[in-house]
Amino acid sequence: MYNAANEEAAAAFLAGRIHFPEIVDVVSHVVGQAGEFAGVPSSVDDVLAVEGEARRRANALVDSLAR
C-alpha cells in the first residue's frame, strides 16, 4: 500500500502535477486511511485489491492537489 501510493505520487510529481513535498502528503494520507480498506490479506487477490484502492486514493488526492 505504501509503495503503491508512493509510485502514484512520484509519477504525479514527475508529470508536473504536484510539488515534491506533496509526495509525502499523498503517501501519509493514504497510509493514514489504511484502516478503512486494508486488513490482513488472505490471498493474492486481497493484496491486489488493497494495492488498487491505495492507488485510487492516491490519484484522487493528487487530482485535488494538482496545479
Image (spheres, rainbow, N blue to C red):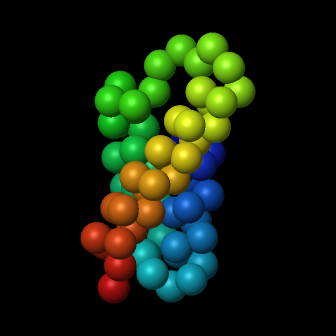
Q: Residue at x 55, y 46 (%)?
A: 52
Left or right? Give the position of 1 relative to 30: right
Between 62 and 45, the one lying in front of the other is 45
Specify whether 33 is left or right of 2: left
Q: Position of residue 46 (x, y in %)?
A: 60, 27
Which residue is located at x 60 percent, y 70 percent?
Answer: 11
Q: Residue furthest right?
A: 44
Residue at the image point whose x is 39% and y is 68% from the top: 62
Where residue 21 appears, as percent x and y from the top left, is: 43, 65
Q: Place residue 56 in its image quadrant.
A: bottom left
Q: Extreme left residue here?
A: 64
Side (left or right) of 14 relative to 31: right
Q: Position of residue 31 (x, y in %)?
A: 42, 38
When the figure is inspected, residue 58 is found, relative to residue 39, above or below; the finding is below
Residue 22 visible at all: no
Total tally of numbered discs in the picture: 0
